[in-house]
Image (spheres, grey):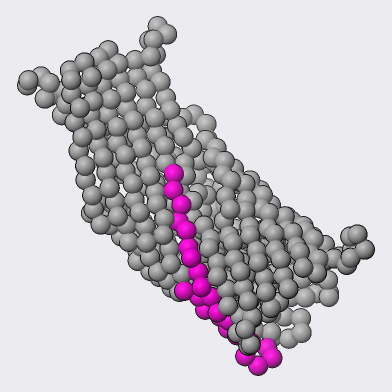
Amino acid sequence: MRIRRSIFISALAAGVLLAFPGLSSGQLVLGQYEEEAPVRTWNAFAPATAAALGRGETSMTFGLNAASAPANPALLAGLPRFTLAVNGYVQSAGFNKFGPVNTGVIIMGENASLGSVVIDVAGISVRLGGWTLALNVFSDEIYDRPATSVQGKYNGVVYYEAEYSQSGMLRTWQFAVARRIGGRLSIGAAVNAVQGSLEREFIDRSYFPTIIISDRKTQNFSGFYVNGGVLAEISEKLQAALVFRTPYRKGIRSESGLRYEAPTAGTDIAIADAADDRAEIPGSIGLGARLSLLPELDVFSEATASFWSGYTVTFFGDPQVREFKDVVKAGIGLEYRMKARFFGAEAVVPFRIGAVYDPQPAKSLRSAYAVFTFGTGVQGKHFGLDIGGQAGQELGSGKSLGILKLALSLQYVL
């Protein structure tokens, strides 16, 4: 009995260390690789639809439909009386350190790639009198990680296996309202309710004899924040925007299930735990400008400051070390619009290019994404289609994490 208990305690301790890499490497600061980090970037101020993506993720001063409200609700005031929109994307993002991978448990020589297919924005807007109302639902943060498994073999016989998986999403429900004041100013505000989940699982199997240690953790999120903006027509050729998102507390219900199985010994022990955690999400402010060089040619520029130095998070009651700094993300873009005819009907065909500089908030790992963007589309009287893409690379960590993304947006207007 004493030997069995010792084996159980040792194996259980090993399982805990494997499932919580942060505990086994207290001096390791993972920065952008933290398990709660969104895929690719922390700076998810608002989802970029295909049109905005193509011109350097600039979305504060020009919008085509209801999906513009997450970035700047004031844009709703300039929309047609009814719009309906949906946006989705396919993406490939590089990872090097995540969960137990390259943090002391599983060693991987090359970067891992994660492919995603996401419908990230759907919205509807309607103008009633002098007010424009909109309802949007969008997925602004994805928490997936590449599924990882390793095996240990001796003389062709497997004696050890380990598997790690992580998935999750944060979804936001938004109600927005906007109004035009005078001839040159529009204002807008929105209330946002967030909900989502994150699930991690680590399974450790050893053979001869067979011992299986599995650890599964789930977290459910909820929260509430306000965002708003102002759009001002400085002159006939220049527009400027000021936007904000309030800080908020993200409530987290954490649950854990740790299980130890030794079939040959008839042992099956499960340990459950739960906690009410929280994350203090900092606020953001942004400035944007749109300059019309020609009636068919616009230049866009934006900068968004996110105050990540105020970010804190707990995990099963324990405060986590997150040494973050405030950052400013910047984007620039060009859009040229050409008139065309399709099946006898007039349409506008835009051509877009842009660039984004997206620094990450970790102090100990100075890194940023440098991204080139491009896009086109066709806008008819009632129907519109936009395609936007971006290709970039992370700089600073020495791992050269790549990013490829292609977005498609459909709209209907009256």
In magenta segment, residue 397: no
**Res. 38 visible in picture:** no
Residue at image coords 52%, 78%: 189
Q: In the rendering, at what x and y percent does residue 268 appear?
A: 20, 27
Instruction: Return the x and y of residue 40 as percentages of the image width and height.
Output: 52, 49
Q: What residue range appears in magenta?
A: 167-191
The residue positioned farthest toward the top in the image shown = 155
Q: Residue at x 72, y 80 (%)?
A: 238
* Above or below, comparing residue 391 to residue 55 in the picture: above
Quarter of the image for residue 221 reads bottom left
| Closer-to-camera residue (323/137) | 137
As drawn, the residue found furthest toward the left would be 2
Q: Residue furthest bottom?
A: 182
Q: Nearer the viewer, residue 405 or 199?
A: 199
Expressed as whole percent of the image width and height from the top left, the position of residue 71 reads: 57, 69
Q: Residue at x 58, y 81 (%)?
A: 178
Left or right: 298 as drawn, with respect to 275:
right
Residue located at (46% from left, 52% from top): 169
The image quarter in which residue 122 lies: bottom right
- In the figure, is residue 108 to the left or right of 29? right
- The quadrant in which the N terminus is found is top left
Vertical position of residue 144 compared to residue 241: above or below: above
Q: Main secondary structure of the magenta part?
A: strand
Q: Is residue 170 magenta?
A: yes
Q: Quadrant of residue 302?
A: bottom right
In the rendered image, the vertical position of residue 84 relative to residue 398, given as above or below: below
Q: Is residue 262 left or right of residue 336?
A: left
Left or right: 161 with respect to 386? left
Q: Nearer the viewer, residue 13 or 355?
A: 13
| Residue 406 in view here | yes
Report x, y in % for residue 116: 56, 44
